[in-house]
Image (cartoon, helix red, strand yellow):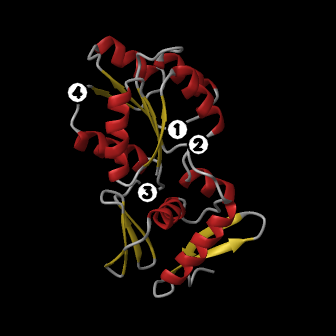
Amino acid sequence: MKLLLIEDNPPLAHWLTQILRENKFSVDVASDGEMADHVLHTENYDVVLLDLMLPKMHGKNVLRRLRERHNAVPVMILTASGSIDEKVECLGAGADDYLVKPFEVRELVARIKVLIRRQTPDKAAEIHCGDLSYDSNTRQFAIAGKTLALPAREHDVLEILMLKQGKTVSKNALVNGIFNLSDEPSADAIEIYISRLRKKLEPSQAAIMTLRGLGYLLKQKDDS
């Protein structure tokens, strides 16, 4: 899962980035409103964490521009202001959640997971594809109840395919979903991760299909 953290306080941004990466999230950081607005024009994210008091462009304007572009990515406001009026204004402008600083990291992570879960078709905590399961709370995979441990990149690819189960996911979408702004995106690497995942899924009832010119599809092996 790929997050954009928009925060102008360097120590706080660094600390949050480390915590979120420890929780298996891929994180990009924007340190001002203009940078955030530009990144949101060019990149796709699963959740945006948005501070309000930003240099160059206020967080509310970043949110307003995002929604004017009909971008429905979930946005959580992270701010020191506990004003009810400001909370109501942000939620009315299109924010999905509002968390006041200082906050417990466990609560932040739990709320992020809820926002991600809302995007899945059945909104269930556990998703299945045959005997392959994915727990959105622990973000762990299992085959027939046995934990499937995966390297970070492979985990990210399978996570995207699982959450989009039954839908074709393009190679570009996978590239955008697993590589950070500081990485060197590689479409060839996606093919390697898919190949490795196919071997690891051989004992399961789930399979990754290639639809030429379109992308990849995760489905049950016995699906017609």
Residue 137 pos. (x, y %): 31, 56
124 and 52: which is toward the camera: 52
Q: Which secondary structure lies at badge 4? A: loop
Q: Is residue 201 visible?
A: no
The picture places residue 94, in percent across and down from the top left corner, at 48, 26
Distance between the Cα atoms at labels 1 and 4? Answer: 24 Å
Mark 2 or mark 1, which has the lower sequence index?
A: 2
In the image, 206 versus 193, the foreground residue is 193
Q: Are marks 4 and 3 in contact (CB under 8 Å)?
A: no
State left or right for residue 71 relative to residue 24. right
Nearest the viewer among 181 and 69 is 181
At 35% from the left and 82% from the top, the residue drawn is: 144
The local crowd at label 3, few if under 14, some if 14 to 19, many if 20 or more residues have their Cα within 10 Å, is few
Report how far apart the C-alphas of labels 4 and 3 lie in the structure.
Answer: 32 Å
The span from disc 3 to disc 2 (Cα, nearest Å) is: 22 Å
* SS assignment at label 3: loop
Q: Residue under circle 4?
A: 102
What kind of residue is marked 1?
A: Val
Task: Give the mark toward the camera: 3 or 2.
Answer: 2
Numbered circle sitting on residue 122: 3
From the viewer's perspective, is residue 96 above or below residue 207? above
What secondary structure is found at the residue carrying circle 2?
loop
Report the residue marked by disc 1. 73
Counting residues from the start of the chain, the first of labels 4 and 3 encountered is: 4
Q: Is residue 105 above or below residue 152?
A: above
Query: Tag 4 or tag 1, which sits nearer the N-term?
Result: 1
